[in-house]
Image (cartoon, coloured by chain):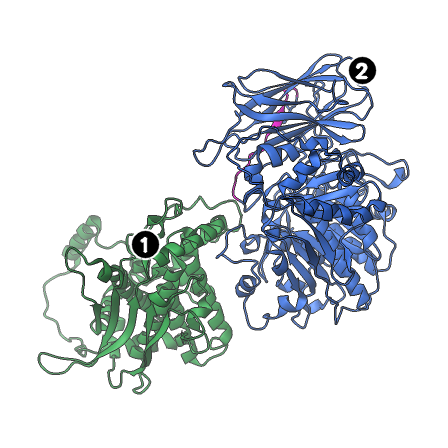
Amino acid sequence: MAWSFSEPWRGDYDLRSIVGMDARANWLLGVRRAEFLQENDDTLVPFLVIFDREAWIDPMSEFLSQMNERTGVNVVDFMIEGYGTRLIAANVIPLLANLKFFIDLSKFEGDGVTSAFREEAKSIILSNPSPMFSGHTGTLTLPNPKFLAGPPAESVITAVIDDGIAYAHERFRDATNKTRIFGAWDQSLPFFDSFLSKAEIEADFATKDEDQIYRDLRLVDFSVPGHKSAAWRRAHGTHVLDLAAGFPPSENKTDRPIFAVNLPERVVADTSGKFLDFYLFLAAFYIALRANALFAAGVTARPVVINASFGHSTGSHNGEARVDDYISGINAFAAEGVKFIVPAGNGHQSRCHAMINDLGSPVEFDWMLLPNDMTDSFCDIWLPEQAETDRIKFTITPPGGIAHEITDKVVALNPLPAVDLLDQKGTVVGRAEVVRAALNRYKICIALHATDRFQPTNEVVAPSGRWHLKFEAGENNLTDTINCWVQRDDSIYGYPQRGRQSYFFHPDYDRFDKYGQEIRDDEHVEQGPCPVTRKSLLNGIGSGRETITAGGYVGKTCKLARYSAGGPNVQPAEAPDHFRKPDVLLVSDDSPALLGVLAAGSRSGSVVWMNGTSVAAPQLARHIADLIAAGDTFGRPELKTKAETEDPCAGEPLNEDRGGWGRLSRADSHKVDRL
Amino acid sequence: MTVLSTLGSHGSHGSHGSHGSHGSHGSHGSHGSHGSHGSHGLGHYDSSGLTDALITTRDGITGPWVLPGTTPAEHDGENASNLEKWSPRVRGAVIDFEIANRLAFTTNPSPPASPPDQADDMSRTAMLWHTGVPSGTPPSAQMFEIAKFDRPSDAFFKLQMKYLEHWAELRPDRAVEILEQLQSPAPFLASIAFMRADTKRWTMELLDTVIRLARLVEYRFKHSLACRRPNEYSPQVQPIIMTPGHGTLPSGHATEAFAAATLLLRLLKDTEKPPYCDTAYVIQFMRLAARIAINRTVAGVHFPIDSVAGAMLGVTLANYLYARSHPTAGQRMYNAYHFDGAAADDRDFDWTDVCDAAALNVKVGGGHPSMKDYKSGIDLGADQSLILEWLWKKAKSEWT
């Protein structure tokens, strides 16, 4: 079927009809499909499918081959070299498919296979297309060659999933000028060129300088487009990997082998993290796979320490992070499991969260869209988990426009409610949809066009300014909290500035106290009941049970870093005494004046500062690797004990929601003092 | 301030303050030491107040006029050691003349008739020559090749535009360097081999000399080849510094940086004193020169091919000046090279494609396809320059 992008999306398919479908599906594959798919309608969209039970893995083969037989459908799955099996981690399967696949899936046609898939799939998480998978059909095999020589038996494996990891850096080499990186994956490259072996990384150490090595490895190749993070003096991934597993070569730490994965540029550039999951899953799977291969080569099987200093601002933030669904699969696949460490996130002061507990009287506030925001803006309104509907009436009013109403009155019905949002002139500038997020869980997803575009085009822009949000009571009582989150869409260091962060505005939210000091916590301000809050802005991948989450504190003052986000502090019934989010705090700024902590710059011999909870997580990873190396049992209870007994600021009060179980100092093996 | 004054003639500095928030700057201000070449220590000459004061002072103390008793010995004429007596500005002019009076420049084909023939105009070739010892009246001389340039096609430059887009990403990372490098590469060279203007004054003069030579030649080539700048190909390059008012190829910064680096390396090697004669210095200086050249692409004012051409010219000119400065007959040797723009392939600038670090010379074969031999092993024979030898020896004596 030839597809023309010049045609506006007329809603002739509704992907929400697939249970568990990504909440953004209609926006990405409908309204904005021309931009999202970039190449054409045959562009492969990566996605994760999480099934309700592992037993459905077998019928998958049948389903995939039947789908591939359909006219115009292309769906690609993965095999693992040496295993002879499809790439599956527990009940999670990564796939790639073109648009027609999703459309066919959404149009329930009564055939057995499609309907079985629809019944079994618990959630489908979309990611963005990547040049890595351009033009493939059939099956892709994840390479997994045997290691002929491995590190010492007592080694502990550390892995970092990041952006701009400079593989050839001396901090990752041993005393014989060989790299300690036993495998690297550059997800910005075409699939078959993207895996690097230890031998390939170190081949030219003796004869070429680092600029030439990175050009040859295509990590920094200015003849091709795209951001080159490792060309910058301050490279996020290099700094992070140094904190996690960097040592001077003279220490010859051959018992600390490393795996490194650089995420695709397009995934990194999108600060919302909404496209992270697929690549994060594959990266973690690759690490577990290669770690198993090292175990087969003689390394004693132990937990693999994986650090991912990334995050996303989506998710329910209620301890049910979707990352749990697939990290548990990785955990099961790795011989002795993984320790997955992530940052708490830096959004504490972002004004991106609002909570509504009571609708006795209407609750109103604004969603502030900035001018010159070249990326789309998204807001999720999570309705409480309960069976009754008709609990709220929600209206959204564009600046100068008319009020659009949407209720949860009809959510049990099919189709789910949706409304196009019109500006003053009657142009459709966004869309609000009710989406089923789980069995009894619904959310209202609002997507708005960018407020500015690069070139004079016919593309729609949404008006910037105050989008007014109003919540009123429905027929039934609200018995639980409504949570609203604005998705992060600012720009990160080094990348071109495209997005500008939108946020909630309420007159009772005070940023500064009467002395002009910045207010750090909701508790410390005398203000009226304000729906906009600093609570629960924790990294979306950090709020679950499978991830260990590091917040940041200021080393000199022992106080929380101003940006370090706090969790929902949901404590699961089975482990109330050792579950808290974030788990612990690490130094993310040396002092209020000496920002960040020091670690490797992108080229050997250079040192740069970097801050944010991104630098806290790898310090925790290093601690955990040290504990595993010492043969200690390591789990949340042990981490709690360590933080409580080794807190360098014992006695300094900790914030309930943000402080975790306590603070830890930097590991002795990586301490660069500046004070 | 003559010695280094010519280095600053690019002109568009003054926009400091815009360099980002990366926190690594703070080393500005260390350049002040260059000023010590002049006579500033004696105060403010040539002001009207001082002139008045000198008149009244003389009136007050001179007394009756007395004929001179003893007189100073006469200076030797045309003696190179007199150079030390002249002020740096004058010395610079003498040295420049010494170099330039043996240079010749030709083009082939001849400059196009008016209206210009398109085909001829596009395939411009330009050559730099050394004029051998002239003899006879009027003098005639044998000409020796130094460098030859065939300019790349317009289509080739267009092909290289992508590098302008890709490298622009690093502007926030390199802005401070780019601005500082609008002036002399000397502080950057001095950060590798220990040089201060007050303790290595002759070395600094020697480096300034080769940079002046590079300027003299590069501008002539730029004028002849007349290649357009990147921002004339696209409105989106938007350079972060003022685009210089001359042609793009060869890159002046590449020519000067590679010329200075190569000549300094020749000098350090000549001292035969460790550690300066170590290979580590070669790599470091070449990488520095390459970084200076690449920064010009980041800034948005040069194509990578400009740096290729400039690096070749810089290395060639440094080796030529070395040959002319060499005190020993039989060792006044250099190689002439040919930049063949038509043979260039579309690749990024990599100094190892252009420079043979071990030989301290241009790399032909196995590197950039535009690099070609022109004439190897040119021997200047008895063609001795006492002036250039003098400066060389003075500079060398500083590295003991």
Q: Which mark is residue A477?
A: 2
Q: Which chain is blue?
A: A
**Residue B373, quarter of picture:** bottom left
Magenta part of the chain = A496-508
Tell me the residue at 68%/56% (across/down): A140
Residue A576: percent from left, percent from top: 89, 37
Magenta highlight on residue B259: no
How crowded is the residue under tag 1: few (<14 C-alpha within 10 Å), some, or many (20+)? Answer: some
Chain B is shown in which shade?
green
Residue A182 relative to residue B336: left or right: right
Tell me, yes or no, whether the two marked residues, 2 and 1, touch with CB atoms within 8 Å.
Answer: no
Residue B150 relative to residue A668: left or right: left
Which residue position is annotated with label 1? B10
Magenta highlight on residue A507: yes
Residue A315 relative to residue A450: left or right: right
Residue B106: percent from left, percent from top: 21, 69
Tell me the residue at 77%/42% (across/down): A50
Tell me the residue at 51%/73% (across/down): B280
**Residue A288, quarter of picture:** bottom right
Residue furthest out toward the bottom: B330
As displayed, is residue A275 above or below residue B123?
above
Q: CA separation, marks 2 and 1?
A: 74 Å
Circle 1 sits in a helix, a strand or a loop, which is it? loop
Residue B85: percent from left, percent from top: 25, 71
